[in-house]
Amino acid sequence: MRNKVEWRDAKVAEIRQIAEDVRYIGFAVDGMVPRFDPGSHSNIRVEIDGEAANRTYTVIPAPPGQIAVAVKLHSQSRGGSRYMWSLEVGQDVRLTLPENRFELSWRAKHYLLLAGGIGITPIFGMAKALVARGASVRVVYGARSRGLMAFADELEALLGDRLILRDNSQGQHIDLAAEFAALPADAECYLCGPIGMLEAAKAAWAESGRPVSRLRYEVFGDSGLFAEKPFSVEVLNRGTRVAVRSDQSLLDALIGAGVEMIHDCRRGECGLCAVQVLGEGVEIDHRDVFFSAEEKAAGHKMCACVSRLTEGHAVIDVGYRN
C-alpha cells in the first residue's frame, strides 16, 4: 500500500541553466523535508491554459530543506515544462514530498547506470549515492550533443574514468551489448531514457542471458517513435467523440470531455489508464513500459497517459481493463 501523498507549500529558491534545454529549479519547502532516496519523484502543481494540473518530476540532490528538479523544455510540451520554465525566484508553488518507484537495491557488487538525454535525472542522484557508499559503479550517458548533457561536468568530477559520455552528433552511441557483456555476473543495471533506448536495452539484456530482475528502468512518456500529431477517438457506447491536441495526452482529453478514467502514475508504468483500441489499421505510438512487446505488436491496447495514435481516428473502449 502506497503512503498517502503529502502536499506542501514551497517557494522557488534557485533557477539556473544546466544544459541548453534543461533548467535546475530548487524549491524551499515549508516544514521539514524528510530524507529521500535517489530515483524519487515529486508532483508539482502547474497551470496549463488557466487550469491546475499535476506534473511529476524526478527529484535531484539539493540543499537541506529544499526539493530540486531538472526540467527539459520540450518542443511538444503538454504545458508542464513551459510552465516550469516560466517560474521565477520567490514564486509560490505546491508540491508533494518525494516518493520512490525507481529504487536502488543496494545489494549488488557492481552497478551500471545508463542514461539517455533527460533520463540523467535519476541516474545523477544514484551515481552520487553509490559513490558516497564506496560502491563499484560505471555510468554511460548519451545525448544528441554535448551541450544537451545536464550534470556532465559534475559527473566527470565525481566519477573520472568511470563516466563514459556518448555524443550522438559525433557518431557516438551506447553499445548496449558490449556494456552488458562486460558486467560481472552479479551486477545490476539501472536505465532511464527514451522508449527506443529502453526497448533495445531489454532485448540486449535478454540476449545476454542475465536475470530480468537485475535490469531496472524508468522511461519518460514523451519519448515516442513519431512526432506528436493531433488525433481523435470515439468512445464506444458513449456517443462521445474526443479531439486530442498534439500537446495533450489522450487521458487528459478524455477527462476534459467528461469521460471518467482510472489513472495513477501518468508515466506509462502502472497500466491503470489502459484502453482498448477497436478496428484494424490503427497505428499506435507506444510510449509505455506496462504492456509487453507482444501486446504492443498486436496493436489493440494503449496506455492513455503517454501512448498516442500516430494520427487519424479510432474507436476506443474505456471500460476495458487488463
Image (cartoon, grey):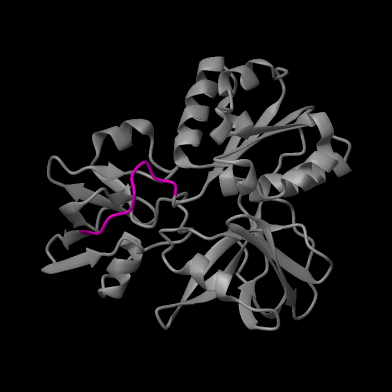
Which residue is painted at 26% across and 48% down in the image?
310
Residue 289 image position (x, y, % from top left): 45, 42
Which residue is painted at 83% across and 65% down in the image?
63
**Residue 49 drawn above or below residue 310:** below
Q: Which residues are magenta?
A: 223-231
Q: Quadrant of the N terminus?
A: bottom right
Question: Which quarter of the picture shows residue 104?
Answer: top right
Q: Nearer the viewer, residue 6 or 142?
A: 142
Q: Is residue 152 left or right of residue 200?
A: right
Q: Nearer the viewer, residue 243 or 322?
A: 243
Does residue 225 belong to the magenta stretch?
Answer: yes
Q: Is residue 69 left or right of residue 303?
A: right
Can you see residue 136?
Answer: no
Which residue is painted at 37% across and 41% down in the image?
225
User: Quick one: which residue is furthest to the front in this view?
Assistant: 170
Question: Which quarter of the picture shows residue 91?
Answer: bottom right
Can you see residue 68?
Answer: yes
Q: Is residue 48 left or right of residue 142?
A: left
Residue 234 image position (x, y, % from top left): 15, 61
Does residue 228 belong to the magenta stretch?
Answer: yes
